[in-house]
Structures are given as C-alpha cells and as structure tokens.
Amino acid sequence: MSNIANSFGMDEALKQLGIKDVNHGTSTGSDNFGSGPEISSYSPVDGQLIGKVTTTTQADYDKVMDKAQAAFISFRAMPAPQRGEIVRQFGNKLRDLKEPLGKLVSYEMGKSLQEGYGEVQEMIDICDFAVGLSRQLNGQVIPSERPRHVMREQWHPIGIVGIISAFNFPVAVWAWNTALAWICGDVCVWKASEKAPLCSVACQNIIADILKENDLPEGISCIINGDYKVGEMMTTDSRIPLISATGSTRMGRIVGATVAQRFGKSLLELGGNNAIIITPTADLKVVVPGAVFGAVGTCGQRCTSTRRLIIHESVYDKVRDAIVGAYGQLTIGNPLDEKNHIGPLIDKDSVNTYLAAIEKAKAEGGNVLVDGGILEGEGYESGCYVKPAIIEAENHFEIVQHETFAPILYLMKYSGDVENAIGKQNGVAQGLSSAIMTNEMKEAEKFLSFAGSDCGIANVNIGTSGAEIGGAFGGEKETGGGRESGSDAWKVYMRRQTNTVNYSDELPLAQGIKFDL
Ligand code: UN1
C-alpha cells in the first residue's frame, strides 16, 4: 500500500470491507469460485496495485448458475415484505460501512471522496426505496366485459438477473438493480467492470454476511469476474431472462442484439451526450456550479456528465467568461484529499482517448478556451491526471457528436427562440440527460413538452448529472431506452401475468363470439 493510500486509511478500509491478502490476490467474495487468471486492480490515484481477483471460467460460471437457480426457487417463495427486510439490513450495513466503501470507490475508481460517499449514499437510498416498495408490488384489477368474470394483473419474480456494470459507478448501479431485483424475488449475477473489481468484492462481502446471518442461500447474490467473454456467458445464456447492462453504446449494441436473439429482456443504460441550454434569463449563480460540476465531476466520466453548453448569443460572452473563470478555481489531485475537486481519469487508455478528442476538436475547427493536457510531477505519478478543457465548437463536429468519457466541455451559441437551442440539444444520437437554465416559464415548459427535450431526463435550473434515485433513470435513442432505479422501474424485474377468472355457471366468450355445442 502506497504512502498516499496509507495516510488516508486505505489499509483499514480494506480490512473493514473484508478484502484480504492485498497485493497477493483476493477471493471473489465469500465463495472463492474463480479459477481463471488473475486481474490486477491498479489505483489511478497513485498507480499502485491494490489487489487482485481471480476470473471466472466457463466451469466456474456453470457452478455459479447452479447456485443461483437453486436460490431462486426458495427466494421467490419468501413473502416480498420479508425480502424487503433483507434489503433493509443490507442498507443498514451500508450505513455502517459508508466510510470505508466510499474510500475504496474513490481509491479504485478515482472519483472525489465526496462523490465516493455520495455513491454509497445512492445505494442506501435505493435500499430504503426498495424496502417500501416491497409492500407495493401491486397489480391491477381490470373490469371484465363478461358477467361474473374478473380480470387482474399479477407481478411474479422473473428469475436470474444478470448485471453488467461500468467502472464509473462501481457500486451504486449494481445496487439500483439488486435492491429492486431482490424485493421482486429475483436473484442476481453480477459482472463488474474489470477496471474496478475490488468494489464488487467489497459489495459481495457485505451482502454475503447478511445472507448468512439470515440463513439464506448465497446464490441470491453472485459475482463473476473477467472481460467481455465472461459477459458473453451471460448474454447468450437463456437461464438469464433479464440482462441489465450499463456502459458504452458500442457494448450495448452487442448485448442488446445477443439477448434479443434468445428473446431475453435487456435493460440498457448507455452513452449520453448531455447539454445544458443557457437562455437570456438564466441566473449565473445557478448556471456556473451546475455546468462546472456537470462537466468536471467524476472527471467527466458520468454518463450524465455535461458535454455541451448551448448558450444564447445575447449572454454568450458573460456566461463563457464566468465558466472559464470558474475553471481557474478548480483543484486537481488526489481525490481522497477533500480539498481537490477532481481526481484522475480511470487509466492511461482513457487519457489517450481524451487527448485524441481534444486534437480532433481542434482539427475540426474548435477554438480552445481552456487547454487540456496531462499533469506531471509530484502527486501526478500515475499519469492519469488531466486538465479539464473547454472548447468552442459546432454541434455538427464529429467529435461533438461522440461521447468522450473525459472532462471536455464544448461551448456553442444559439440565436433567436429556445426552439433553436432545443434543436441543437436533440441533434445528437444519444438521449440521456438534458437541462435548461431559464426564469421564463414558457421556455421551461416548451423544453419539457413533447416538442422539447428528447432525453429520458430533462431538468430545469439544475445540471444534467446527479439524479436522485426516486425517478426512473435512463434515456432514449442510443442511450438504450432502459429505466433503472425509481418510479415504476421495478416492473422490468418481474413478469406480468394477466388472469381472467370466471365465477359464473356459463362460458360466455369475449368479443361476443357464439360457440354453441
Ligand atoms: C452513471 O453515470 O452511469 O445522475 C450514473 C447521476 C448519478 C448516476 C450516474 N446519480 O449523475
């Protein structure tokens, strides 16, 4: 463990999370089922090895699936509110372990400690939400057209839910899925990103303890490790009726097509290209923190990160200067140190993608307002720390149309009515998050109307990122169409059954059909 990590108590945090044998390999949870080659997890914070996990072979995978299938048979029979009680205990354990888990998220993934804690808070919040929901998995009673008949709708557990998650939210996105899936009576198999495997081991250890304390089968929560080949074991497996996948549009296209081939369901939460429209009446006090946090939070690696600012020409100079000024205040460095706003990118590949995007934007005619680049010297030894960049660009530039998972913010002007800005905002292939800054009621309502933003998330006077768990989360177009977390997103984790019951002594047919014998 490096000095940096030690001075922020990482050793102790890993101990509290049950991650053993640091630097010598670790287990894949309570049950050491991985027998494939090891993956090393290096921290982007200081470049040091944190630990290793073993990967899952086909034979290991089949063992996991046997356990999950057996666990489902008993778990689905447990009353939903009792399943809610398990999730309640899980949420309480997360409250106890918020500090070490938040630290691990920050150290393994590189987001600021505040955001690491925030991510664990999202897990706690979704647990609370799921506990309440465990008493509300209500179906409907529907009037039948036939006398003495009743129609109703029931929701049944669907089976094994396969979860594929990305490095950028290495614990919360899993929890959005599992907390709901569990109260619905499903069991989960999770393939975390190979860039943040220890976060998944930590989560698995927490839930494994809860399952043990309650004498429940550990197959209710399983993790598997490895690259896309391990993901393929799940996507091609008809024992898994639902695959929930978060990641790039490229990955989602493959996952969606593979799962559809076998008529499975997929819940896809893919790339975003999120914009904030800044109108003439926008309040700078709201605009600046909203846009800056949106663009540089998590070092620009949220699917909800703000990538574009579409600014009315009448306020363009003022807004541009305020944003550029705010960038001058940003501190970049060790994310465990709370005085820093921004930590590193996840790895050097990501740094190269970021550098290439800046070059591309310049080549396409972009005008650099705040230049990017790699930071070097003391504290930046991992090579993953970069400067957030601001570039004036046009919406139609190929690079602007593309999601680059890095802190690059494109500024562009609009003139005339808000419709012109909405046209630009919608003029990309992705449809996750969007926002408008305005004090004009009519502009706000136009933006939220059917003719307004085409995104799954549309906000007024807040930024594009930082959604609460209570709303359904996800987006349209190349974002994949899935919805996770709040509202009625739980329904995708269940199968719907329509029942018609005849309590008369006749057999009238629907649609008035006569069939006399
Ligand atoms: C993601 O980046 O995949 O709305 C999830 C947000 C967070 C979740 C982001 N609550 O920014």
Image: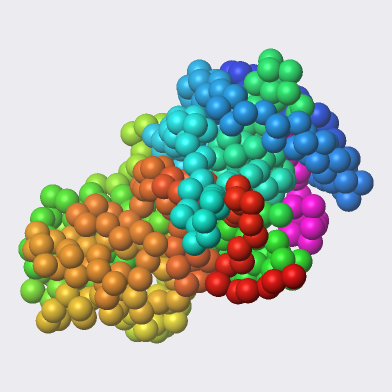
Spot occupied by residue 455 in the image (x, y as percentages of width and height)? 37, 66
> Residue at coordinates 62% horizontally, 28% vertically from top-left?
79
Q: Nearer the viewer, residue 62 or 43?
A: 62
111 versus 359 height, above or below: above
Quadrant holding the N terminus:
top right
Quarter occupied by the C terminus:
bottom right
| Vertical arrangement, residue 163 with respect to residue 171, above or below | below
Quarter of image, res 291? bottom left
Residue 193 point in image, percent of width and height: 65, 49
Q: In this view, does 160 lie above or below 355?
A: above
64 falls in the magenta region: no
Residue 81 visible in the displayed image:
yes
Residue at 68 percent across and 73 percent down: it is 515
Q: Nearer the viewer, residue 367 or 171?
A: 171
Relative horizontal placement of residue 419, taking residue 207 as reference (left or right): left
Q: Can residue 368 be seen in this view?
A: no
x then y, percent, for residue 466: 36, 47
Magenta-drawn segment: 220-240
Residue sitting farthest toward the front: 517
Q: In this view, does 305 lie above or below 67?
A: below
Q: In which quarter of the image is residue 212?
A: top right
Q: Which colour scheme is used?
A: rainbow
Q: Which residue is drawn at 33% across and 56% down?
A: 464
Residue under the point 78% across and 36% down: 73
Instruction: Tell me: 2 left or right of 423.
Output: right
Q: Outermost residue, right direction?
A: 59
Q: Position of residue 349 (x, y in %)?
A: 60, 60
